[in-house]
């Protein structure tokens, strides 16, 4: 592992990022680890150059993310094609995706170099937005795709089909289609279930449905979901991982299915998904 390169992604909004970045880069270089810096990281350190984020994920053997879950989602989308392993260091708040606490950063890196870790493969969703027979946008997400109404719209209406079969017409403030990883994000706030990431599935969670019998729906991970906007709504959006927004109009269809790519998160054998849930959601001790 020692010959491998580490790409570093940061978000400068966290006050402790600069000091941490300086220290970890010096530590890695002192061990002759090849460090690749994103442009944000290079600017923070006052170094010339820096790779564009997309380049970083294609050149590095491991991505080290200093940030919160938002930075991790960004990294997951960048790393999707090569399935580059990602080690997340939590500098944010809740942090379901970031494996390592800041005070445990260096011991964790030592374990990565010693190959004392496991790769936790997470299902990703591939999205295409079709308009009059043409694809106008596409993307791959780790957490969710959200269809939401415009600020002035009363409700949106969506025709939902699974594997080409009509399921229902949904009138609501929106719909969240999430992966198991995304089940603890927006979907959870909207009343969706928590899904263990090992369960290959998609979750369709309505946001404030007009008909109360519309409940969260869990479907197999290998199906294709088509969502067609049937109402006329100015400002309706499809949002990918809460970070990329695409305007949609009446008649547009958002198609979602499992991506052939996976996000590979570096985990340590003693860490457990249910330990994370218990800690993050403040569940009681046994």
Image: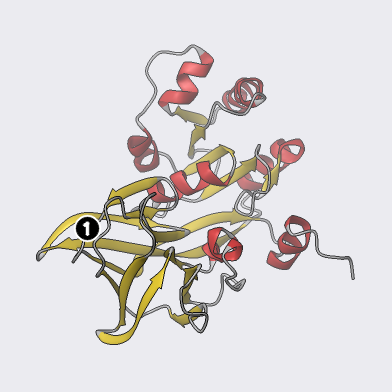
Residue 277 in view here: yes
Q: Nearer the viewer, residue 69 or 45?
A: 69
Identify the image quadrant of the C terminus: bottom right
Q: Viewed as shown, does residue 253 lie left or right of 8?
A: left
Q: Who's the residue at 37% across and 80% down the image?
A: 222
Task: Give the class, few, some or many, for how many residues have Cα within 10 Å of label 1's Cα (few <14, many ≥20).
Answer: some
The vertical placement of 62 against 269, above or below, is above
Task: Tell me where residue 178 appears, x and y as whole percent.
Answer: 46, 66
Image location (x, y in percent) of residue 125: 38, 64
Q: Quadrant of residue 159?
A: bottom left
Is 69 located above or below residue 149 in the figure? above
Residue 236 locus on image (x, y percent): 31, 55
Q: Residue furthest right?
A: 286
Which quarter of the image is occupied by the N terminus? Answer: top right
The total of numbered circles placed on residues is: 1
Q: Quadrant of residue 89?
A: top right
Residue 145: image x %, image y %? 40, 60
* Colour convention of the picture: secondary structure
Residue depicted at x 72% and y 63%: 277
- The residue labelled by disc 1 is 249
Residue in view at x 48 percent, y 30 percent: 34
Q: Residue at x 52, y 44 (%)?
A: 70
Q: Looking at the image, is 250 positioned above or below residue 50?
A: below
Disc 1, SS: loop
Outermost residue on the left side: it is 133
| Residue nearest the viewer, comparing 250 with 270 | 250
Locate residue 120 relative to residue 273 in the image: left or right.
left
Q: In the depicted view, which residue is nearer to us: 138 or 227?
A: 227
Residue 159 to residue 117: above or below: below
Occupied quadrant, residue 103: top right
Q: Is residue 130 left or right of residue 277?
A: left
Can residue 225 be spotted in the picture? no
């Amino acid at each position: 592992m020692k010959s491998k390169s580490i790409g570093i992604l940061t978000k400068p909004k966290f006050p402790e990022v600069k000091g941490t970045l300086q220290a970890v880069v010096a530590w890695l270089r002192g061990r002759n680890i090849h460090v690749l810096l994103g442009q944000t990281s290079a600017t923070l350190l006052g170094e010339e150059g820096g790779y564009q984020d997309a380049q970083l994920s294609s050149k590095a053997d491991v991505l080290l993310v200093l940030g919160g879950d938002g930075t991790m989602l960004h990294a997951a989308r960048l790393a999707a094609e090569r399935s580059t392993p990602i080690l997340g260091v939590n500098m944010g708040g809740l942090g379901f995706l970031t494996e390592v606490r800041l005070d445990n950063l260096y011991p964790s890196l030592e374990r990565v170099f010693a190959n004392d870790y496991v790769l936790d493969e997470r299902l990703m969703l591939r999205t295409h937005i079709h308009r009059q027979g043409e694809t106008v946008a596409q993307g791959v997400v780790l957490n969710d795709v959200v269809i939401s109404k415009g600020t002035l719209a009363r409700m949106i209406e969506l025709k939902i089909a699974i594997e080409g079969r009509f399921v229902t017409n949904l009138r609501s403030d929106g719909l969240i289609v999430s992966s198991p990883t995304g089940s603890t994000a927006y979907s959870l706030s909207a009343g969706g279930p928590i899904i263990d990431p090992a369960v290959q599935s998609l979750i369709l969670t309505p946001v404030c449905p007009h008909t109360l019998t519309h409940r969260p729906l869990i479907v197999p991970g290998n199906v294709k979901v088509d969502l067609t906007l049937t109402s006329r709504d100015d400002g309706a959006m499809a949002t990918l991982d809460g970070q990329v927004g695409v305007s949609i109009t009446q008649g547009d269809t958002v198609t979602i299915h499992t991506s052939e790519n996976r996000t590979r998160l570096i985990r340590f054998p003693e860490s457990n998904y249910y330990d994370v849930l218990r800690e993050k959601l403040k569940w009681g001790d046994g």
